[in-house]
Amino acid sequence: MAKIIDGKAIAAEMREQIAADVKVLMDQGVTPGLAVVLVGEDPASRVYVSMKEKACAATGIYSVEHKLSAETSEADLLALIANLNGDAKIDGILVQLPLPDHIDEAKILEAISPDKDVDGFHPYNVGRLVTGNPVFQPCTPYGVMKMLEHTGVDLKGKEVVIVGRSNIVGKPVALMCLAEHATVTICHSRTVDLPQKVAAADVVIAAVGQPEMIKGAWIKKGAVVIDVGVNRVGEKKLVGDVEFVAACENAAAITPVPGGVGPMTITMLLYNTLLSAKRRAGQQD
């Protein structure tokens, strides 16, 4: 049976260290600050924002939330971002996605100062990631890499198959794996012979957003499986993109859903905010 990669435990350990580092900075007169902007009343977004606020409070990071109505104009949102860009107390700006249809997400993300882009979505930071010299790395894929590192997975020379090609997870995690000298294959829902591609993988990273699309029988014996997917099935049940029980028969290690990658995403947001504050304090990474 597969070893369970406990995202909650890894996140808790990292948050302890983040809290300790925040205290050191505060003793030097610098308090890391995160601004979260929520436009509209999307229920999932409200839950995420609440979790981020609690995580900031637990680690000593100053946080401020800007809740705006769904009718907020693009111009007003851009004006708020401009103010936050100039606010010396704010080290990180996060605009919770999705945004209402009348607001251009790309324009909003590009308006955030690259120096405060703790989500890692600004084209400048994406470009730095592509060239192998990242400033801020996107939180979910960054969390995936930390989980692999914590589990003792050396990616050098390994065959990594990523199922999913989104800008949020699939593409950036592919670049991060390449930087660790893995051989990377990016697949998606239209890939021909997907079972064979997955079966060749030493590491499978699933981020396609389809419940249990990747069957346990596809997983190679001894492979490591990172399941980024969170899919609601029925009223309450959450499942990943991987058929978990069957995959446990073949995998050496696997993340559960929930309790796997999820806790790491917010942890890496805290980490990036701390990193930004350290730069403000004139400290190196």
Image (cartoon, rainbow, N blue to C red):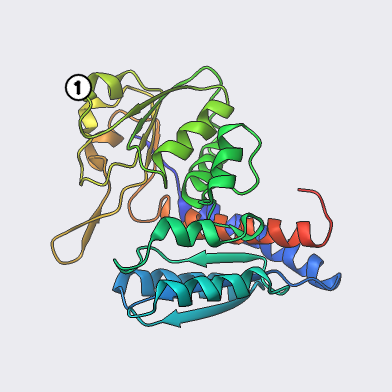
Residue 99: quadrant of the picture: bottom left
Q: Residue drawn at (48%, 20%), measured in percent from left and top? A: 158
- In terms of depth relative to the viewer, which is nearer, 98 or 193? 98
**Which residue occupies the foreground of this view, 285 or 222?**
285
Residue 58 in sight in this render:
no
Q: Is residue 12 visible?
A: yes
Q: Indicate whether 191 appears above or below 172.
A: above
In the displayed structure image, the side of residue 139 where residue 201 appears, left or right: left
As rendered, which of 101 and 57 lies closer to the eye? 101
Say few, some or many: other residues with alpha carbon within 10 Å of mark 1 (under 14 / 14 to 19 / 20 or more): few
x then y, percent, for residue 129 = 58, 38
Relative vertical location of residue 239 with respect to residue 96 in this rendering, above or below: above
Residue 113 at x, y percent in the picture: 62, 59
Position of residue 279 measured from the top left corner of the image (x, y, whole percent): 77, 56
Quadrant the N terminus occupies: top left
Q: Give the residue drawn at x 43%, y 74%.
A: 38
Left or right of 240? Residue 144 is: right
Residue 200: x and y, percent? 33, 18
Question: Dividing the picture into quarters, in which one does residue 254 lie?
Answer: top left
Q: Please state which amino acid type lies under the numbered disc 1.
A: Val
Residue at the far front: name it: 75
Residue occupying the point 38% across, 61% down:
104
Give the SS element for disc 1.
loop
Kindly indicate the quadrant of the structure image that contains residue 82.
bottom right
> For mark 1, what is the residue?
192
Q: Depth check: 5 or 262 in front?
A: 262
